[in-house]
Amino acid sequence: MTALFIPLAIPGPASIILIVVAILLLFGGKKIPELMRGLGSGIKEFKDASKDEEEEEKKID
């Protein structure tokens, strides 16, 4: 049986450059740091909430 070839499995340098250019065109250079900051704070809040949940489970047990 032949191996299944999925061209998007490992993006090459040209694909990465194309994706970055598309993001810059969609959001603009000034908006990207704000989006990343918001994403980072959301991840931090999620981690804090999951730690709090784990601590509550330990207290109950």
Image: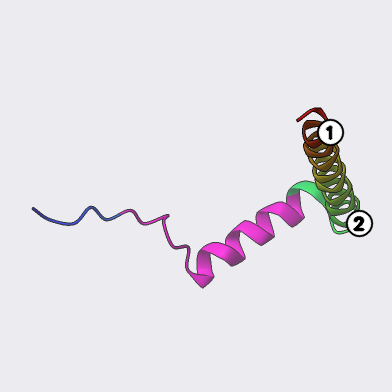
Residue ID at (75%, 56%): 24
Rendered location of residue 55, percent (x, y): 83, 39
| Left or right of residue 1, residue 46 in this image | right
Sequence-first disc among 2 and 1: 2
Q: Which mark is residue 59?
A: 1
User: Is residue 49 shown above or below 13?
Assistant: above
Q: Residue furthest top?
A: 60
Q: Residue 19 magenta-drawn?
A: yes
Q: Which residues are magenta?
A: 6-25
The residues tagged by marks 2 and 1 sit, at their Cα atoms, a distance apart of 45 Å
The residue identified by callout 2 is: 30
**Of circles 2 and 1, which is in front?**
1
Which residue shows up at 47% across the image and 68% down it? 12
Question: What secondary structure predominates along the stretch shown in magenta?
Answer: helix
Of residues 56 and 22, the one drawn nearer to the viewer in this rendering:
56
Q: Is residue 11 above or below residue 13?
A: above
Q: In which quarter of the view is residue 18 placed?
A: bottom right
Please name the residue shown 89% across and 47% down the image.
41
Query: Type of residue at label 2?
Result: Lys
Q: Which amino acid type corresponds to the residue marked 1 in the rendered image?
A: Lys
